[in-house]
Amino acid sequence: MNASRTSTAGRRLGVLAAATVATLAIGTGPAAAHAEVTASDSRALAENVTLSFVSEAESDAAGIKELRIVLPKGIAPDTVALKEAPKGWKLAATADGYTVGGTALAAGTDAEHSVTVRQLPDAKSLAFKTVETYGDGKISRWIEVPGDGQQVENPAPVLELKEAAPGAELIAPSPSAEPSASASSSAAAGPGDGATASASASSEPEADAEEEDSGSDGVLLTVVAVVAVLAAGAAIWWVRRSRNRA
């Protein structure tokens, strides 16, 4: 009888442990929403390419009002033009890319827009770090670039490129490849002023991500400690109960 009770207690503790692990996995897994990019021509050095971006909504309380895109090396802000975007949204160049935004979308609506690029650089892949600003001030950063097969929680949209077409050559950059101070100022004064200011303030998006990750690590350690204490207490209680019944 004692062996049977002990076995039952062990099975229950096993179920508790499995549930705890599942809860932690859910809490620490990657976010459901994400940002993506596709291209009309994904070959290196391709010209007049349309890049299409989709930022999935992750808030039920407010809609996306602005996107800030950090362009990869080899694509200058002045070689990008807006092709399609939500009604009323406009594009403004920044020092390292562009912002596109306007009236906030309805909550739960994905933000989709496309731009034309004069030419893609000669590279194997391109990362477009993206900062999303919502109507209530919430900011989501998809700025982490995975390396060596690693998985990250907030991956930046990455476009994998094929080999350049035979005879493709790099177009000489225009004299105004670097955006002027007035262009950056116009971006700050463009649609969604508050959202642009918030996004521009995070000129070091990697640092922001590290701060957020360190905060998440602290919360995770606290949760693990609490779960460990509860599991230990449950084990002691079952053992004492089994002995008392014996």
Image (cartoon, rainbow, N blue to C red):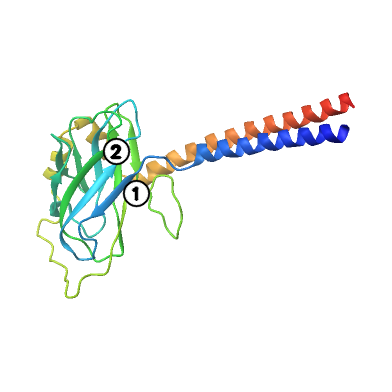
Q: Name the spot of residue 38 as percent of width and height, x first.
A: 26, 53
Q: Nearer the viewer, residue 115 or 140?
A: 115
Q: Say few, some or many: other residues with alpha carbon within 10 Å of mark 2 (under 14 / 14 to 19 / 20 or more).
A: many
- Say whether residue 57 is visible: yes
Q: Residue furthest bottom?
A: 167
- For the residue labelled by badge 1, is the local secondary structure a helix, a strand or a loop? loop
Q: Name the spot of residue 54 as percent of width and height, x first.
A: 27, 44
Sequence order check, earlier mark of 2 and 1: 2
Name the residue type under label 1.
Ala
Q: Is residue 50 left or right of residue 199?
A: left
Q: Nearer the viewer, residue 111 or 201?
A: 111
Q: Quadrant of residue 171?
A: bottom left
Q: Is residue 1 left or right of residue 145?
A: right
Q: Name the spot of residue 169 as percent of width and height, x first.
A: 16, 71
Q: Which residue is mark 2?
A: 132
Q: Name the spot of residue 3 as percent of width and height, x first.
A: 86, 36
> Which mark, residue 156?
1
From this view, report whether residue 85 is shown above or below residue 135: below
User: Which residue is rendered at x = 33% and y = 25% of the image?
Assistant: 61
